[in-house]
Image (cartoon, grey):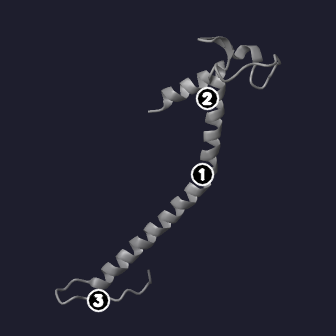
Amino acid sequence: MGTHIKRIVAPDGTVLREEVEGIRFLLEEGMNAFDREAEWIARMAPLKKRIEQLEAALEFYAQPETYFAIAFVGDPPCGEFLDDFEETELGEKPGKRARAALLAAEQETP
């Protein structure tokens, strides 16, 4: 919007020029907000995809039917391997932490 606004007055006394400049200003502000939102969405897209991949992995490990232990080794960053077992409908199975994480996420979701 320019610093010099010329007044254009309609025959009925309405100041048209100021209204046009105001509408132009609002339109520019709206476009700027749209550009910022589009940029934010573009930056979030890879994160959303990564979250979906992690959720799929978590769901895989939470299912007693899909995850089978093939080795017993310690994994200090995530806790001991044997601590990840619990009794399921299919017997003693790994995936306890994944199931707990999914349950916690379900309870947090409105």
Q: CA distance from mark 1 to mark 3?
A: 47 Å
Q: In the structure shown, which secondary structural element does the residue marked by tag 3 occupy?
A: loop
Q: Which residue is mark 1?
A: 45
Q: What residue sits 83% from the left and 18% below the top?
A: 73
Q: CA distance from mark 1 to mark 2?
A: 21 Å
Give the quadrant of residue 92. top right
Coordinates of residue 29 in the picture (x, y in percent)? 44, 69
| Image quarter hosting the N terminus | bottom left
Query: In this rendering, would 27 be left or right of 52?
Result: left
| Category of crowding for the residue at label 1, using alpha-carbon neighbours closer than 10 angstroms: few (below 14), some (14–19), many (at least 20) | few
Earlier residue among tags 3 and 2: 3
Coordinates of residue 72 in the picture (x, y in percent)? 81, 16
Q: Which residue is mark 3?
A: 8
| Image quarter hosting the C terminus | top left
Q: Amino acid at mark 2?
A: Glu
The tag on residue 59 is 2
Q: Is residue 29 above or below residue 39?
A: below
Query: In this rendering, would 96 be left or right of 107?
Result: right
Front of the two marks 1 and 2: 2
| Category of crowding for the residue at label 3, using alpha-carbon neighbours closer than 10 angstroms: few (below 14), some (14–19), many (at least 20) | some
Earlier residue among tags 1 and 3: 3
Front of the two marks 3 and 2: 2
Q: Nearer the viewer, residue 96 or 31?
A: 96
Q: Amino acid at mark 1?
A: Ala
Q: What residue sits 51% from the left and 59% below the top?
A: 37
Q: What residue sits 78% from the left and 26% below the top?
A: 77
Coordinates of residue 76 in the picture (x, y in percent)? 80, 22
Q: Nearer the viewer, residue 75 or 61?
A: 61
Q: Amino acid at mark 3?
A: Ile
Q: Is residue 31 above or below residue 97?
A: below
